[in-house]
Amino acid sequence: MKVRIKFAKRGSMKFVGHLDIMRYFQKAIRRADIDVAYSEGFSPHQLLSFASPLGVGIESEGELFDMTLAGRQEPAWIKDALNAQMNPEMEILEVWELPEDAKKSMSLVSAADYRIGFRDGYAPDVDLAETIAAFYAQPEIKVIKKTKSSEKEVDIKPMIYALSADADHKIYLKAAAGSVENLKPELVMEAYFTFLGIPFSPFACCITRLQLYLDE
Amino acid sequence: MRKLALSDEILLTIEKPARYIGNEVNMIVKDPKQVDIRFVMCFPDVYEIGMSHLGIQILYDMYNSREDIYCERVYSPWTDLDRIMREQNIPLFAIESQDPIKEFDFLGITLQYEMCYTNVLQILDLSQIPLLAKDRTEDDPIVIGGGPCTYNPEPLADFFDLFYIGEGEISNMELMDLYKANKAAGGSRLDFLKAAAKLSCIYVPRFYDVTYHADGTIASFEPNTEGVSPTVKKDVVMDVSHTYYPKKPLVPFIQATQDRVVLEIQRGCIRGCRFCQAGQVYKPVRERSLEFLKEAAVSMLDSTGHDEISLSSLSSSDYSKLPELIDFLIDHCGSKRVNISLPSLRIDAFSLDVMKKVQDVKKSSLTFAPEAGSQRLRNVINKGLTEESILNGAAMAFHGGWNRVKLYFMLGLPTETPEDEEGIALLAEKIAMLYYDEIPKEQRQGKVQVTASASFFIPKPFTALQWAPMYTCEEYDRRAHFVNDKFKEQLNKKSLKFQWHNADVSVLEGILARGDRRVGATILSAYRKGCIYDAWSESFCYDKWQEAMAETGVNEEFYNLRTRDLDEIFPWDFIDTGVTKEYLKREWKRALEEKVTPNCRQACANCGVKVFGGGVCFEGQN
């Protein structure tokens, strides 16, 4: 039996990195007595597959991972059993059963929604809705992408699927995510600050991933 | 969001921010306003090391079992955060409540190794607590030291208000009650220290005066305050099957060094190796009952979700119910896919059989600790392991499919000669040859690999070798290179590897281990020069330590290089561990005569610990 699990990672848990979150779940699954399936071999591991690593510093309302079970346990029971093991800043939001031949969520991720706010003292002194609209209306949004060996200029506009700001001074971004194309929200915000002519601090934004989109 | 002491800006700048945020699985949450005593327990090294320590988990569980106490934790901030905290004047905080440590009633620091001493000063400094106990006021926490290094607390005497000598499960609760009573009666800090000093295991350094002879040795060590005992007795838990043990140990987010359930099966050791401090100060051997261990194992695995359990003791093979315990664990853990790890097992038919059941033979290696290269020198240090038993064990293991062997040695042992040193290379060579003799070519799974590691011998207080001299850095390097050259002369040199530790760290550890109160000034001076994390080779700076020694008049000749007189008063003589100095003198003499002393189960050597009235000394008599 395969299930997909959607969870939230909030508050101070944003400082716990992706690998440590995986270990956190492995232990929680054991404590919850979930009948998880294991790989073969001398050091078997739980059959878990996380959809998309979340960077340190980012909160989330919609992370996904897939789990293979050895026997049958009801999704509703799994949700309650896992929630009983979570700390107050982690929450299992949904558990649903997948067909046996379902592809791993990791290979299906295509986009993500983000909510972006500003830390105290970092909000630019401009009309957010207006400038975001003007920023997004540009025909091209060029940024310098640094890799280990080189720096190159790329147009990130095609990877931005939606961008707007609301009255609460929050920015909503839908951008490419996953193994084919992936756009980091920080990069969009850096380009926006450059557009405004304001120096960008890596601490300016607090980002929440709201949802992952899968190509199914 | 949970309140955090550090801003997002800082936490996103430093390495591994999860070291500082708390909220780990099984963390205890209490309202600090609802308790009478706020205690913070410190391991003065980085989080991943400190979180691996069983002792703190036991005491954390014990203190928090009381409603009137909230025990929290703190570890050394890594050097990146250390810099930021100093620049921005941020006070060090406890992980649970994230409140500044200076607001607590107690700061308890465990002292597990000498090379953490400058980290103790880092903790006090970042907490904004005066480094010297004499400068502290009524508003500062009481600073307590505990752990193995308190068997010679003197180099740290200036920095601590009191030391707790021995196992923490016994008198800590009484100490807390004394504190509450003193507070209720409106007593001062000094009043509390006087009351605490009445407990037989509590040492308050300021209540003792030391005088010295012209040659630098101690002339007298005496109480200067009425009602303070001239000796301090170590506390021992005699019934280790009915005592505190954490049912729900903490599980960190980031991977700790010890990322598994730790099951302490017994305390003490019957072996009596003459270099080993733990073997003497944790006497007598006390085994935990099978029932206690089964219950503890099951509840800890259930409450943590760990996928590995490790047995812990000084010599697990000597635990009398080991086969039953392992059968139980294999049975229980197998169904739950929990791995079993068995360090400190003697290699023999039984242990090889067990290891084959619980480990991947291809991935594991065999470990022997001959400690010295010749039988003569092994007799000097009373290490019972013979060449014959090593070769027998290795042969059995090779037939079982193992082909990697690790050997541990010490260099610079008393009476050591070039023949003893060469013996290290010869023993490694014999083991490699044995592999090729025993295992036919077609059955070999690659080459045999024998890795020998040498550390430099450091005499420790309360051991039979506490009178022995050490050597200089240059001499240690010379000996290590001599052994290395001998390895290169061996026929199977391509299957052999020899590695050794840094000599300068050992020299310093020697000075701190057998140091007196005057060494405190050296530690303070080294800290002022920027020394912290001395246990980490990337931050250890011997030059600064040498400057500090020169400035404070502490030298190697006096602390390390001389053979101490039999009637010399040692800085740690005021501590009563149960093991008598007469016994240690007898053992020192027997060492020089190359005479082996039987272990506690073979014959009683009258070491003195019978006074505790239990443990191995009285086995089979009830």
Image (tube, coloured by chain):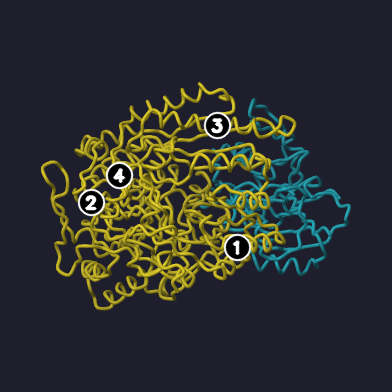
Chain colours: A cyan, B yellow
Looking at the rendered structure, the kind of residue marked 1 is Leu
Q: Which mark is residue B512?
A: 4
| Chain-order first, disc 1 or disc 3 | 1
Secondary structure beneath dot 1 equals helix
Q: Is residue B352 above or below residue B22?
A: above
Kindly identify which residue carries mark 1.
Answer: B325
Residues at marks 3 and 2 touching, judged by CB atoms closer than 8 Å: no
Q: Is residue B333 left or right of residue A73?
A: left
Reading the chain from its start, which is encountered first: label 4 or label 2? 4
Q: Which residue is denoted by mark 3 in the rendering?
A: B430
Q: Name the mark nearer the viewer: 4 or 2.
A: 2
**Residue at x 39% of width, y 37% of height:** B456
How far apart marks 3 and 4 lie (CA) works out to 38 Å
Question: Is the residue at mark 1 from the same chain as the one at mark 3?
Answer: yes
- Give the chain letter at badge 3: B
Tag on residue A99? none
Tell which subunit mark 2 falls on: B
